Amino acid sequence: MASVSTAPAPGMHQIDLSKLNLNQLAQLKQQLDQELNVFQDSLQTLKIAQRKFVESGESVEKLKPETKGRTLLVPLTGSMYVPGTIADSENVIIDIGTGYYAQKNVAGAKDYFDRKVKFVTEQMEKIQVLGIEKTKVREAICMMIEMKVQAQAQNTSTS
Amino acid sequence: MAAEIQKKLQKELEVFNSLQKEYQKAVSQKQQLDGQLNENKAVKEELMLLKKDSEVYKLIGPVLVKQELEDARQNVAKRMEYISKEIKRTDVHISALENKQEAIQENVNKLRNNLGNLKIAA
């Protein structure tokens, strides 16, 4: 799959690249660098989101029927806690985004977090594939710049 | 003559710069809207997955207020509609700015050529 999608791209770009002048090539390279940076940032953000979902999923697994009525300390602030008991060990309320919260049972919550982790992982994979392709194009541009610079140097030395 | 063209060129470049700023603003606005639309899409899917008698809450300030599932679904759908409209509006704005930029770029190139020709003639 990957070889099919990447094979025609370098050929197309090679034709394009040899026609561009140095200035255009530099501009193109800069643009690609920017795009690659955006990809890196997105990957970082997705990784954080993924970790949060995984952590939430693990927390929900700790909520078992036998934890009902157990005492725990509820954090009111980062440094102040009040004692409490778990009144309901079967249902949790989940932030599903844009200010909406939905009540789900433990199994439903686990399923929700699993789905979210899967979704985020898929997005990360997509970005990685795109990033690899862009990196290849960037390499091709760098090579072309070098070739053009050398050709220019030779021209000036012979003339 | 050359000074006049130089002046014109300066003016065009100023317009170009302000256009570019506006363009960047529009693009980042579009990205933000895209993000919001995606989030709303995810929420809508989640609301559709919920059973009819599921409890749904909405965060209003620091408190969670209970809501009817159907209301929540409609609200999200309405929001998505609004955001989609905004995205379309921004798209039109962006393409208009692109056209303007191109036109000015052409003008700038022309003026630069004129200036170059004058210099050669002089």
Image (spheres, coloured by chain):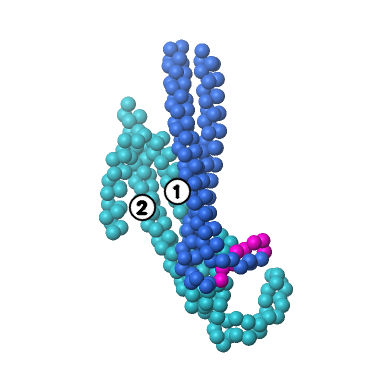
Chain colours: A cyan, B blue
**Which quarter of the picture shows residue B99?**
top left
Q: Quadrant of the N terminus of chain A?
A: bottom left
Q: Residue at x 67, y 76 (%)?
A: A74
**Helix, strand or loop for the magenta stretch, by majority:** strand
Which of A120 and A131 lies nearest the eye of the viewer?
Answer: A120
Q: Residues within 10 Å of mark 2 (few under 14, many from 20)?
A: some
Give, as a single range, the part of the protein colored magenta.
B55-62
Q: Amino acid at mark 2?
A: Glu
Q: Residues within 10 Å of mark 1 (few under 14, many from 20)?
A: some
Q: Chain of mark 2?
A: A
Q: Is residue A152 visible?
A: yes
Where disc 2 sits, the SS reads helix
Q: Is residue A56 visible?
A: no
| Disc number placed over residue A27 in the picture, else none | none
Q: Residue at x 47, y 65 (%)?
A: B48
Q: Residue at x 43, y 12 (%)?
A: B121
Q: Amino acid at mark 1?
A: Glu
Residue B54 at x, y = what percent?
A: 53, 72
Question: Looking at the image, is mark 2 or mark 1 earlier in the sequence?
Answer: 1
Side (left or right) of B67 relative to A16: right
Which of B69 and A93 lies nearest the eye of the viewer?
Answer: B69
Residue A148 at x, y = what percent?
A: 34, 37
Side (left or right) of A109 relative to A11: right
Q: Which residue is mark 1?
A: A35
In the rendered view, tell whether residue A23 sits above or below residue A76.
above
Side (left or right) of B116 relative to A13: right
In the rendered view, tell whether residue A147 sits above or below residue A87.
above
Q: Which residue is mark 2?
A: A133
In the rendered view, tell whether residue A96 sits above or below residue A140.
below
